Image: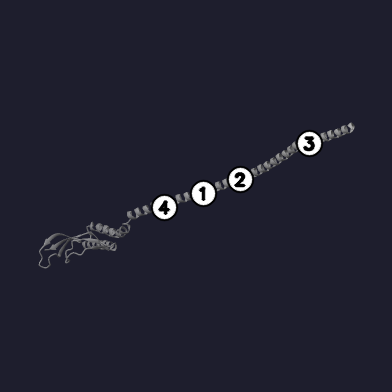
Amino acid sequence: MEEVEVVSKTAEDREKNTAEEQHETVEESVPQQQAENGEEQSVGASEVKEEQGSQDQEQSTSEAADTELSLEDALAKLAEAEKKAEESYQKQLRTQADFDNFRRRSRQEKEEAAKYASLPLVEQLLPALDNFERALSASKVDSADKDSIVQGIEMVFRQLEQVLQGSGLESIPTVGTAFDPNVHQAVMQEESADHEPGTVIEELQKGFKLKDRVIRPAMVKVSS
């Protein structure tokens, strides 16, 4: 009976030891499993971080490339704008220079036109001047014919008169016309039975108009 109890007790001890060993094994395996899981999680997190870092690097590279392209485009547009501005400035300078040349040329032409405005009239007077010089030369000759000299002077007078009339010069009518203070200058008055009062009875100096403008009033004697 005692042997049976000893055997039974020994078997119980073995079972108990076995259970304790299994428990210890389980306890040892749990931390190991946890460690392995932790390592796997750490590896997974590292891979995720590496992948995320790679994506961030690719994105940064792409953004840098876009920024570089944008900067190149901006520089190209700036260069084009500067080129257009320079072309516009040069065009403005040429336009201003052309305008200055035109204004200077117009002023010179105006000055020359005013300076030589009497040229056509002078050219027409030259023949009359030549004839007048011939008449004076002929009058100095002792054997000169008086009638010929008079005819020469009359010819010069007609030439001068024709030239002046061709330029718009005309004489102001006087004797027999009513006194007009716009064209006549009365320097004397005289009673006249043959004329009504206020009538020009004598011309003392011719008056002239150039086209519609009086350039010299006629000096006259008027009846009172």
Looking at marks 1 and 4 on the same chain, the residue that comes earlier in the sequence is marked by 1
> In which image quadrant can residue 106 be found?
bottom left
Q: Are marks 3 and 2 in contact (CB under 8 Å)?
A: no
Looking at marks 4 and 2 on the same chain, the residue that comes earlier in the sequence is marked by 2
Left or right: 123 in relation to 38: left
- Of 168 and 75, the residue lying toward us: 75
Tell me, what colour scheme is on the image? one colour
User: Which numbered tag is attached to residue 99?
Assistant: 4
- Of 82 and 45, the residue lying toward us: 45
- Of 61 and 95, the residue lying toward us: 61
Mark in front: 1 vs 4: 1
Instruction: Tell me the kind of residue under disc 1.
Output: Ala
Give the CA separation, mark 3 to mark 1.
85 Å
Looking at marks 4 and 3 on the same chain, the residue that comes earlier in the sequence is marked by 3
Give the CA separation, mark 3 to mark 2.
59 Å
Above or below for 164 versus 68: below
Looking at marks 1 and 2 on the same chain, the residue that comes earlier in the sequence is marked by 2
Residue at mark 2: 63
Give the CA separation, mark 1 to mark 2.
26 Å
Give the CA separation, mark 4 to mark 3.
111 Å
Mark 2 secondary-structure assignment: helix
Mark 4 secondary-structure assignment: helix
Give the CA separation, mark 1 to mark 4.
27 Å
Residue at mark 1: 81
Mark in front: 4 vs 2: 2
Q: Return the x and y of residue 142 as percentages of the image width and height.
A: 22, 57
